[in-house]
């Protein structure tokens, strides 16, 4: 687990602080709680969720970007992704995404987190290999500076499925302050994403392809949704 203090000095000269370790711990505690109820979860209180569907043209490879109130973004796997929907058995997570690119070698220093690798939306963060032979690429989904990848996944890859919006996050990305909100506006809202999932389910039913995995889950451990 990590402890991260991010201090940004943009034109506003405003310090933005966050303890990611504490936040993820609190999110993890909420993972077992249903979304319904009178007490909003940590994710619902402090994060805005945006969804990227069919990443890079790959059907159902969906991601959820959780933007904290200080603009720091967690890149996570959305519940419609085959890793979660089909409950795939994950064998390994590999941050070596190219011959000369290993995301674990990303280093940031100083209050402004200098030196981090710059990512575009399609930049690869890691590759996930499953027991059935399938391999999925985890992408950044947004433009920004890579702060850190989640090395815990090397030893506990199943966290991607059991704690997708907590300890199973893929990476932490820091967009430029001036463009963060604009990027989030281009993503789907939770309500829009639910509509996409419903449409997919109806299509599978029409084709006779509906499976037990299509039954909606009420556990937040399977979702990173926040209320509209």
Image (tube, grey):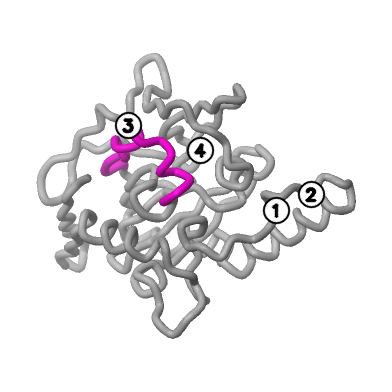
Expressed as whole percent of the image width and height from the top left, the position of residue 207 reads: 88, 47
Q: Residue 171 falls in which quadrant of the image?
A: top left
Label 3 packing within 10 angstroms: few (<14), some (14-19), many (20+): few
Q: Earlier in the sequence, mark 2 or mark 3?
A: 3
Residue 173 locus on image (x, y percent): 34, 48
Q: What label does residue 210 carry, if any?
A: 2
Q: Residues within 10 Å of mark 1 (few under 14, many from 20)?
A: some
Residue at 60 percent across and 22 percent down: it is: 133
Q: Are marks 4 and 2 in contact (CB under 8 Å)?
A: no
Disc 1, disc 4: CB below 8 Å? no
- SS under mark 2: loop
Task: Please give left or right for residue 76 compared with residue 118 in the image.
Answer: right
Q: Which mark is residue 155?
A: 3
Comes first in the chain, label 1 or label 4: 4
Q: Quadrant of the N terminus?
A: top left
Badge 4, how many Cα within 10 Å: few under 14, some, many 20+? some
- Is the C-beta separation of discs 2 and 3 under 8 Å? no
Looking at the rendering, the stretch of residues picked out in magenta corresponds to: 146-163
- Disc 1 marks which residue? 214
Give the left or right position of residue 94, taking residue 189 as reference.
Answer: left
The Cα–Cα distance between marks 2 and 1, rounded to whole angstroms, is 6 Å
Q: Please state which of residues 207 and 227 is positioned toward the viewer in this rendering.
A: 207
Label 4 sits on residue: 122
- Name the one closer to the observer, 195 or 89: 89
Residues at circles 4 and 3 in contact by the CB criterion of under 8 Å: no
Real-space Cα separation, disc 3 to disc 1, in angstroms: 28 Å
Reply above or below: 106 against 226.
above
Cα distance between the residues tagged 4 and 2? 30 Å
Q: Secondary structure at mark 1?
A: helix
């Amino acid at each position: 687990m990590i402890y991260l203090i991010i201090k940004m000095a943009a034109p506003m000269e405003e310090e933005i602080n966050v303890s990611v370790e504490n936040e993820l711990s609190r999110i993890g505690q909420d993972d077992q709680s249903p979304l319904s109820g009178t007490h909003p979860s940590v994710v619902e209180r402090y994060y805005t969720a945006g969804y990227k569907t069919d990443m890079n043209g790959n059907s159902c490879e969906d991601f959820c970007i959780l933007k904290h109130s200080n603009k720091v973004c967690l890149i996570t796997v959305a519940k419609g992704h085959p890793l979660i929907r089909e409950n795939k058995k994950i064998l390994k997570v590999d941050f070596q995404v190219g011959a000369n690119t290993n995301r674990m070698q990303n280093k940031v220093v100083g209050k402004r987190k200098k030196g981090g690798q710059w990512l575009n939306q399609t930049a690869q963060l890691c590759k996930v290999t499953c027991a059935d032979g399938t391999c999925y690429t985890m992408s950044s989904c947004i433009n920004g500076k890579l702060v850190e990848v989640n090395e815990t996944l090397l030893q506990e890859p199943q966290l991607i499925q059991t704690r997708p919006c907590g300890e199973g996050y893929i990476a932490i990305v820091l967009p430029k302050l001036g463009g963060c909100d604009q990027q989030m506006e281009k993503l789907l809202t939770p309500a829009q994403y639910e509509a996409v999932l419903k449409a997919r389910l109806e299509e599978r039913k029409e084709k006779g392809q509906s499976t037990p995995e299509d039954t909606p889950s009420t556990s937040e451990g399977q979702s990173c949704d926040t209320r509209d």
